[in-house]
Image (spheres, grey):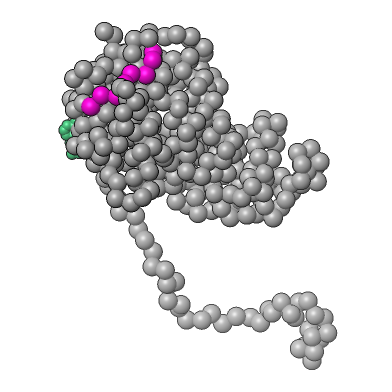
Amino acid sequence: MNGIQLAQGVTLPLSHACKHALITGATGTGKSTTAGAMVEGLSAAGVPVLVFDAKGDLESLGARVWCPFGQRGAHRAINLGAAGADLVARALDLSPAQSGAVEIVAAYAEDKGYALACLDDLQAGLRICTEQRAAVSAQYGLFSPASAAAVSRAILPLRRAIGDAFGLPGLDPFEAASAGGVTVYSCGRLAQYPGAYAAAVTACLLTLYRDAAELGQVDRPALAVLVDEAHLIFDGATPALVRKLEQVARLVRSRGVMLIFATQSPADLPPVISAQLITRIQHGLRATTPGQVAAVRAAAMGLPSAGGRDLSGEILALGVGEALCSVPDMRGRPGAAVRAKMRRGRIELRPIEVARPATVPVVKAFRPDPPGPLPVKEDRGLWRLLNPIARLFVRI
Ligand SMILES: Nc1ncnc2c1ncn2[C@@H]1O[C@H](COP(=O)(O)OP(=O)(O)OP(=O)(O)O)[C@@H](O)[C@H]1O
Ligand SMILES: [Mg+2]
């Protein structure tokens, strides 16, 4: 059978891999190990894979590693223009009024043909729109200088912390697809800012949605995209963005794109999204609080089971590396979940070795240098220059 063996008796048919996959389980139960084995299997079958690595432990999977800061691999940044105004607003944690100002700057930049790739471009756009607010407001709707100023203030801390992550060259999933093999986008530092991580992932998915060609039914994916810590994409996403992502998940299927989302619980994702992820690998969950008990029950209900039996007890009993697996059958129908010991890949999952910077940055003492002897100044007070009567008085 032309598929990827995930466990003894569990094979994912490549021709139905584009029905997407969801890997869930409590921390330490084996999600990354299963995801790693799946990535290796896809790559061995000739499918290029792009991995969004939120923790750094998947870097060793990559034939190449890219990094938004250029520190852990080749520099590939988040192009704000590709991300779009609503993702920029989310990365900056803006209010709806402030998002409106970003929306106007984005529209203005597009119409004028200006690049809006990095945070400095956005600052410049805010300044220009503020200077020309009458004309801008007439064309795009009310542009509020107060909102623009608030956006500028929001940019400042992000720019200082992770400013290099935005700009060019932008992360391009088609580059990963044509390079072949496994490309890991190392997001350990970026994921400390969930809005920025969400912007990187979502911009990539929107690019695929916009630019990938329709392929119809494929015998194997043209590209697989693995997103670790996938809940970060949806935390705080607006309903409009969730709707958009549902559409993306639905439509990229026939463009040969396979999505693999890994997160702790299926309840971490909006139901409209998890409904699009047909292959399910459910590792163990723990339930000590009422909320966790409900999450286990919901996870069990999301798994097709033989005879419709309740799988909650089995989910709680799974050991490390074990999972309940539901993969599509050869006709693409979701198969009944079976309990299995998952295969490990051949590559040990770990961060890559990166040479430490040779020089230690010089940190200047906050206290200014001690003052030398005070220079004797000629008295040229501003008040004398400005006030002719006083000047006259001093002369006298
Ligand atoms: N199939 C398996 N067989 C044997 N050991 C496994 C298997 N899967 C995972 N393990 C072991 O369990 C530990 C945790 O695995 P892993 O990092 O994959 O978990 P995780 O669910 O991704 O954890 P986290 O939520 O912290 O990211 C590792 O030490 C790994 O070697
Ligand atoms: Mg993990």
Q: Report the residue at 35% width, 38% height from top.
A: 297
Look at the image and tell me whether residue 315 can be seen. Answer: yes
Residue 337 in the magenta stretch? The answer is yes
Q: Which of 214 and 138 is in front in this view?
A: 214
Kindly indicate the quadrant of the structure image that contains residue 320. Answer: top left
Q: Name the quadrant where ligand 1 sits.
A: top left
Q: Report the residue at 73% width, 46% height from top.
A: 143
Look at the image and tell me whether residue 187 can be seen. Answer: no
Q: Which residue is at the far bottom? A: 396
Question: Where the C terminus falls, by quadrant?
Answer: bottom right
User: x, y (%) of residue 103?
Assistant: 66, 40
Question: Where the N terminus falls, by quadrant?
Answer: top left
Q: Say if 4 sits above or below 235 in the image.
A: above
User: x, y (%) of residue 219?
Assistant: 38, 8
User: x, y (%) of residue 273?
Assistant: 47, 30
Kindly indicate the quadrant of the structure image that contains residue 392. Answer: bottom right
Q: Is the magenta stretch mostly helix, strand or loop?
A: loop
Residue 151 in the magenta stretch? The answer is no
Q: Say if 43 sits above or below 33 in the image.
A: above
Q: Report the residue at 57% width, 38% height from top.
A: 239
Q: What stretch is highlighted in magenta?
A: 332-339
Q: Which of 12 and 177 is in front in this view?
A: 12
Q: Report the residue at 51% width, 44% height from top.
A: 236
Q: Nearer the viewer, residue 379 or 5?
A: 5
Q: Say if 160 sits above or below 100 in the image.
A: below
Q: Nearer the viewer, residue 258 or 208?
A: 258
Q: Give the total of numbered labels.
A: 0
User: x, y (%) of residue 244?
Assistant: 56, 30
Q: Is residue 126 left or right of residue 223?
A: right
